[in-house]
Image (spheres, helix red, strand yellow):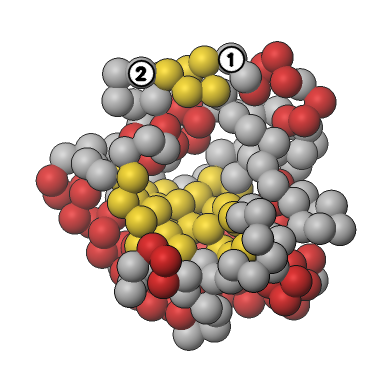
Amino acid sequence: AIDPGHNGGNADHPERINRQVPDGRGGTKACNTTGTSTNSDYPEADFTWAVAKKLQKSLTDAGAEVVLSRKDNAGVGPCVDERGQFADDADVLVSIHANGSESSSVKGFHIIVADPGEDEKTEKASGDLAKSVGSSMGEEFTPNKAYGKDAISRRPDLAGLNNASVPAVVVECGEMRNPSEAELMESKSGQRRYADALFNGIVDWF
Protein backbone atom coordinates (compact mmCIF):
# COMPACT_ATOMS: atom_id res chain seq x y z
CA ALA A 1 0.00 0.00 0.00
CA ILE A 2 1.35 3.40 -1.06
CA ASP A 3 0.05 6.64 0.42
CA PRO A 4 1.07 9.74 -1.59
CA GLY A 5 0.78 12.51 1.00
CA HIS A 6 -1.92 15.19 0.73
CA ASN A 7 -3.84 15.83 -2.53
CA GLY A 8 -3.87 18.51 -5.21
CA GLY A 9 -7.37 19.77 -4.40
CA ASN A 10 -6.96 20.08 -0.64
CA ALA A 11 -6.22 23.81 -0.66
CA ASP A 12 -9.52 24.56 -2.41
CA HIS A 13 -11.65 22.82 0.22
CA PRO A 14 -10.60 23.95 3.72
CA GLU A 15 -13.99 23.04 5.16
CA ARG A 16 -13.45 19.40 4.19
CA ILE A 17 -9.83 18.97 5.19
CA ASN A 18 -10.25 20.79 8.52
CA ARG A 19 -13.02 18.56 9.84
CA GLN A 20 -12.00 16.35 12.73
CA VAL A 21 -11.44 12.60 12.34
CA PRO A 22 -10.21 9.86 14.74
CA ASP A 23 -6.48 10.05 15.41
CA GLY A 24 -6.16 6.38 16.40
CA ARG A 25 -5.30 7.28 20.00
CA GLY A 26 -8.74 8.22 21.30
CA GLY A 27 -8.62 11.83 20.11
CA THR A 28 -9.15 13.67 16.85
CA LYS A 29 -7.09 15.46 14.21
CA ALA A 30 -7.84 17.52 11.13
CA CYS A 31 -8.82 15.37 8.15
CA ASN A 32 -5.79 16.49 6.13
CA THR A 33 -3.60 19.48 5.25
CA THR A 34 -2.43 21.17 2.08
CA GLY A 35 1.18 20.07 2.62
CA THR A 36 4.21 22.23 1.98
CA SER A 37 5.97 23.40 -1.19
CA THR A 38 9.33 24.49 -2.57
CA ASN A 39 10.23 28.16 -2.73
CA SER A 40 9.12 28.11 -6.37
CA ASP A 41 5.67 26.87 -5.23
CA TYR A 42 6.04 23.28 -6.40
CA PRO A 43 3.54 21.48 -4.11
CA GLU A 44 4.33 18.53 -1.89
CA ALA A 45 1.21 16.79 -3.25
CA ASP A 46 2.64 16.91 -6.79
CA PHE A 47 5.95 15.47 -5.62
CA THR A 48 4.42 12.65 -3.60
CA TRP A 49 2.08 11.72 -6.45
CA ALA A 50 4.92 11.62 -9.00
CA VAL A 51 7.10 9.43 -6.76
CA ALA A 52 4.18 7.18 -5.83
CA LYS A 53 3.30 6.47 -9.46
CA LYS A 54 6.91 5.58 -10.26
CA LEU A 55 7.13 3.38 -7.17
CA GLN A 56 3.82 1.72 -8.06
CA LYS A 57 5.11 0.78 -11.51
CA SER A 58 8.37 -0.63 -10.14
CA LEU A 59 6.56 -2.73 -7.55
CA THR A 60 3.97 -3.93 -10.07
CA ASP A 61 6.70 -4.88 -12.53
CA ALA A 62 8.35 -6.86 -9.73
CA GLY A 63 5.14 -8.85 -9.18
CA ALA A 64 3.48 -6.95 -6.33
CA GLU A 65 -0.19 -6.01 -6.15
CA VAL A 66 -0.23 -2.30 -5.31
CA VAL A 67 -3.01 -0.13 -3.90
CA LEU A 68 -2.85 3.66 -3.56
CA SER A 69 -4.65 5.81 -1.02
CA ARG A 70 -5.87 8.19 -3.74
CA LYS A 71 -6.67 7.78 -7.43
CA ASP A 72 -5.29 11.07 -8.77
CA ASN A 73 -3.75 14.40 -7.77
CA ALA A 74 -6.81 16.55 -8.34
CA GLY A 75 -9.08 15.44 -5.52
CA VAL A 76 -9.49 16.13 -1.81
CA GLY A 77 -8.28 13.87 0.99
CA PRO A 78 -8.73 11.09 1.89
CA CYS A 79 -8.60 11.86 5.58
CA VAL A 80 -5.66 10.73 7.67
CA ASP A 81 -7.58 7.95 9.41
CA GLU A 82 -8.55 6.45 6.04
CA ARG A 83 -4.93 6.70 4.91
CA GLY A 84 -4.06 4.12 7.53
CA GLN A 85 -7.12 1.92 7.21
CA PHE A 86 -7.08 1.54 3.41
CA ALA A 87 -3.99 -0.66 3.86
CA ASP A 88 -5.64 -3.21 6.18
CA ASP A 89 -5.34 -6.01 3.61
CA ALA A 90 -1.80 -5.11 2.52
CA ASP A 91 1.55 -6.47 3.67
CA VAL A 92 3.04 -3.03 4.20
CA LEU A 93 2.18 0.68 4.07
CA VAL A 94 4.61 3.35 2.89
CA SER A 95 3.41 6.95 3.13
CA ILE A 96 5.39 9.40 0.98
CA HIS A 97 5.92 12.98 2.11
CA ALA A 98 8.42 15.85 2.07
CA ASN A 99 9.22 18.18 4.93
CA GLY A 100 8.81 21.96 5.02
CA SER A 101 11.23 23.35 7.60
CA GLU A 102 11.38 27.15 7.47
CA SER A 103 15.18 27.25 7.30
CA SER A 104 16.61 26.56 3.86
CA SER A 105 19.77 25.17 5.47
CA VAL A 106 17.95 22.13 6.89
CA LYS A 107 18.59 19.11 4.69
CA GLY A 108 17.92 15.41 4.58
CA PHE A 109 15.29 12.69 4.83
CA HIS A 110 13.85 11.09 7.91
CA ILE A 111 11.42 8.26 8.56
CA ILE A 112 8.57 8.18 11.07
CA VAL A 113 7.05 5.16 12.82
CA ALA A 114 4.17 5.03 15.30
CA ASP A 115 5.15 4.84 18.95
CA PRO A 116 3.50 2.84 20.34
CA GLY A 117 2.53 0.70 17.38
CA GLU A 118 -0.69 -1.23 16.76
CA ASP A 119 0.81 -4.16 18.70
CA GLU A 120 4.27 -5.37 19.65
CA LYS A 121 4.72 -7.45 16.49
CA THR A 122 3.60 -4.67 14.13
CA GLU A 123 5.63 -2.08 16.01
CA LYS A 124 8.79 -4.17 15.60
CA ALA A 125 8.06 -4.83 11.91
CA SER A 126 7.50 -1.10 11.35
CA GLY A 127 10.83 -0.36 13.02
CA ASP A 128 12.57 -2.93 10.81
CA LEU A 129 10.89 -1.44 7.74
CA ALA A 130 12.07 2.05 8.74
CA LYS A 131 15.64 0.79 9.09
CA SER A 132 15.53 -0.95 5.72
CA VAL A 133 14.08 2.04 3.89
CA GLY A 134 16.44 4.36 5.74
CA SER A 135 19.44 2.28 4.72
CA SER A 136 18.36 2.32 1.08
CA MET A 137 17.57 6.05 1.15
CA GLY A 138 20.94 6.69 2.80
CA GLU A 139 22.76 5.29 -0.22
CA GLU A 140 21.32 8.09 -2.36
CA PHE A 141 20.35 10.93 -0.02
CA THR A 142 21.39 12.68 3.17
CA PRO A 143 19.85 11.41 6.43
CA ASN A 144 18.77 14.19 8.78
CA LYS A 145 20.68 13.25 11.95
CA ALA A 146 18.53 15.64 14.00
CA TYR A 147 16.16 12.67 14.22
CA GLY A 148 18.89 10.35 15.48
CA LYS A 149 21.81 8.56 13.90
CA ASP A 150 19.42 6.37 11.89
CA ALA A 151 17.14 9.35 10.98
CA ILE A 152 14.14 7.53 12.45
CA SER A 153 11.55 9.46 14.44
CA ARG A 154 9.09 7.65 16.73
CA ARG A 155 5.87 9.60 17.20
CA PRO A 156 2.42 8.94 18.73
CA ASP A 157 0.58 11.77 16.94
CA LEU A 158 0.32 10.80 13.26
CA ALA A 159 -3.18 9.47 12.60
CA GLY A 160 -2.23 7.69 9.38
CA LEU A 161 0.28 5.55 11.25
CA ASN A 162 -1.89 5.17 14.34
CA ASN A 163 -4.77 3.83 12.25
CA ALA A 164 -2.62 1.34 10.35
CA SER A 165 -2.88 -2.34 11.27
CA VAL A 166 0.12 -3.37 9.15
CA PRO A 167 3.82 -2.42 9.26
CA ALA A 168 3.84 1.23 8.27
CA VAL A 169 6.21 4.18 7.86
CA VAL A 170 6.01 7.80 6.81
CA VAL A 171 9.02 8.78 4.69
CA GLU A 172 9.85 12.49 4.69
CA CYS A 173 11.98 12.28 1.55
CA GLY A 174 13.74 15.60 2.06
CA GLU A 175 13.37 19.30 2.75
CA MET A 176 11.39 21.24 0.16
CA ARG A 177 12.85 24.60 1.22
CA ASN A 178 16.42 23.39 0.77
CA PRO A 179 17.53 24.55 -2.72
CA SER A 180 19.43 21.40 -3.70
CA GLU A 181 16.75 19.02 -2.46
CA ALA A 182 14.00 21.15 -4.01
CA GLU A 183 15.75 20.88 -7.36
CA LEU A 184 15.82 17.11 -7.02
CA MET A 185 12.16 16.91 -6.02
CA GLU A 186 11.03 19.05 -8.93
CA SER A 187 12.90 16.98 -11.53
CA LYS A 188 11.71 13.72 -13.07
CA SER A 189 15.18 12.23 -12.61
CA GLY A 190 15.16 13.15 -8.94
CA GLN A 191 11.69 11.70 -8.47
CA ARG A 192 12.92 8.47 -10.08
CA ARG A 193 15.84 8.35 -7.63
CA TYR A 194 13.47 8.72 -4.67
CA ALA A 195 11.16 6.03 -6.05
CA ASP A 196 14.06 3.65 -6.67
CA ALA A 197 15.41 4.13 -3.14
CA LEU A 198 11.97 3.43 -1.65
CA PHE A 199 11.56 0.37 -3.89
CA ASN A 200 14.91 -1.07 -2.83
CA GLY A 201 14.13 -0.49 0.84
CA ILE A 202 10.77 -2.23 0.57
CA VAL A 203 12.24 -5.20 -1.32
CA ASP A 204 15.12 -5.52 1.15
CA TRP A 205 12.62 -5.56 4.02
CA PHE A 206 10.64 -8.36 2.36
Three-letter code for the amino acid on which mark 1 is drawn: Arg
User: Seen in the image, is 18 located left or right of residue 198?
Assistant: right
Three-letter code for the amino acid on which mark 2 is drawn: Gly
Residue 14 in the image: state x and y as whole percent: 72, 20
**Residue at 48% from the left image edge and 85% from the top image edge:** 139
Q: From this viewpoint, which residue is outermost toward the right?
A: 40
**Residue corresponding to mark 2:** 27
* Dot 2 crowding, Cα within 10 Å, few <14, some 14–19, many 20+: few
User: Seen in the image, is 163 located left or right of residue 195?
Assistant: left
Mark earlier in primary sequence (1, 2): 1
**Residue at 50% from the left image edge and 50% from the top image edge:** 95
When asked about the image quadrant of residue 47, the answer is bottom right
Residue 2 in the image: state x and y as whole percent: 52, 50
Residue 18 in the image: state x and y as whole percent: 62, 19
When asked about the image quadrant of residue 85, the answer is top left
For the residues labelled 1 and 2, say whether their Cβ atoms are less than 8 Å apart.
Answer: no
Task: Specify the quadrant that holds the C terminus.
Answer: bottom left
User: Seen in the image, is 111 located left or right of residue 185?
Assistant: left
Which mark identifies residue 71?
Answer: none
Residue 16 in the image: state x and y as whole percent: 67, 17
70 versus 124 height, above or below: above
99 versus 158 height, above or below: below
* Dot 1 crowding, Cα within 10 Å, few <14, some 14–19, many 20+: few
Circle 1 — which element?
loop
199 versus 142 height, above or below: above
114 versus 40 height, above or below: above
**Residue corresponding to mark 1:** 19
Cα–Cα gap, marks 1 and 2 = 13 Å
**Residue at 76% from the left image edge and 21% from the top image edge:** 13
**Residue at 47% from the left image edge and 70% from the top image edge:** 144
